[in-house]
Amino acid sequence: QVPLVESGGGSVQTGGSLRLSCKAPRAITSVFSPSPMAWYRQAPGKQRELVAQISNAGRTNYADSVKGRFTISRDNSRKMVYLQMDSLSPEDTAVYYCHHVDTMSWGQGTPVTVSG
């Protein structure tokens, strides 16, 4: 397992948007492209849950709670995965984690707070 690097979290008002980014470290760049990638989140006092996943070919699936609001994408040439989050609500407040499925690697998490 090698830590991924997330960025883009922060505080936003209800209805706002954020874009999270995740970069694969050099140690796994050779195996980045074939692997599915995912975003998870963990709210205070709750279990970590899957938010969105994308296959190596770009096929996506989403948690029901974020369908139509969140979009996961990847750029294999840059070893990056993104999560565009729109129409945010306080229920989306959590720490968001990037996950490389094949190596079972995680990032350190980036916090998202939605208020108002």
Image (tube, grey):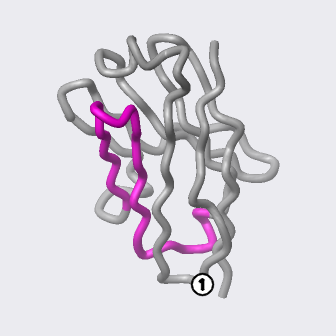
- Judge left or right: residue 37 versus residue 68: right
Q: How crowded is mark 1: few (under 14 residues within 10 Å), some or many (20 or more)?
A: some
Q: Is residue 59 above or below residue 3?
A: below
Which quarter of the figure has residue 34? top left
Q: In this view, does 96 lie above or below 75?
A: below
| Magenta stretch encompasses residue 79 | yes
Quarter the N terminus occupies: top right
- Relative image position of residue 36 (x, y in whole percent): 35, 23
Residue at (20% x, 34% y) in the render: 59
- Relative image position of residue 58 (x, y in whole percent): 21, 34
Q: In this view, does 17 lie above or below 74?
A: below
State the extent of the magenta-drawn residues as a range: 70-92
- Relative image position of residue 15 (x, y in whole percent): 48, 83
> Residue most toward the right?
45
Q: Is residue 67 above or below residue 39?
A: below
> Residue most toward the bottom?
116
Quarter the C terminus occupies: bottom right
Residue at (59% x, 31% y) in the render: 4
SS of the residue at dot 1? strand
- Relative image position of residue 62 (x, y in whole percent): 35, 45
Q: What residue type is labelled 1?
A: Gln
| Magenta stretch encompasses residue 83 | yes
Which residue bears the numbered disc 1?
A: 13
Residue at (43% x, 19% y) in the render: 29
